[in-house]
Image: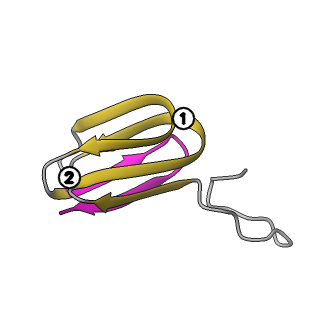
Amino acid sequence: LNCSGFAQVNEQPQEECLKAYSHDGRLVVGNTEPATITVFDMLGRVVAQKAQTLNCEFDLTPGLYIVNNGNSKVKVIVK
């Protein structure tokens, strides 16, 4: 699975490597393969981290966060 964001000319679009969303005030993260999930606030501080996981949840205060699995990054609003 290539998560670099670059595709060869004949290559089909890649499946998402990292999915993250807010549910009931929690940040829910899903990965396609085990990786360390790191959550940053908008000031760049690490607010949560879980090593070598596929799926996890974090209790966070409402706000905007960046979720990183080492290959992909996504922004998520937790309400």
Which residues lie in the magenta part? 64-79
Q: Residue 54 sits in which quadrant?
A: top right
Quadrant location of the C terminus?
bottom left
Query: Residue placed at 41% from the left, 41% from the top?
Result: 56
Residue 70 belongs to magenta span = yes
Q: Is residue 11 left or right of residue 28?
A: right
Q: How far apart are marks 1 and 2 (CA)?
A: 22 Å
Question: In this view of the protein, which residue sits in the foreground, 70 or 56?
Answer: 56
Q: What amino acid is found at the position of numbered circle 2 in the picture?
A: Met
Residue at 63%, 53% (x, y): give it: 3
| Vertical side of 25 occupied by 55: above or below | above
For the view shown, which residue lies furthest in the front direction?
A: 24
- The answer to whether residue 51 is magenta is no
Most common SS among magenta residues: strand
Q: Report crowding for label 2: few under 14, some 14 to 19, many 20 or more residues within 10 A (C-alpha).
A: few
Amino acid type, residue under disc 1 in the picture: Ala
Which label number is shown at residue 35? 1
- Depth order, front residue of 26/71: 26
Q: Which mark is residue 42?
A: 2
Q: Which of marks 1 and 2 is nearer the N terminus?
A: 1
- Where on the picture, by quarter, is residue 38? top left
The kind of secondary structure element at disc 2 is loop
Q: Where is residue 12 in the image (x, y as percent from the top left)?
A: 79, 71
Per the image, label 1 sits on a secondary structure element best described as strand
Counting from the top left corner in percent of width and height, residue 53 is at: 51, 34
Density class for disc 1 (Cα within 10 Å; few <14, some 14-19, many ≥20) is some
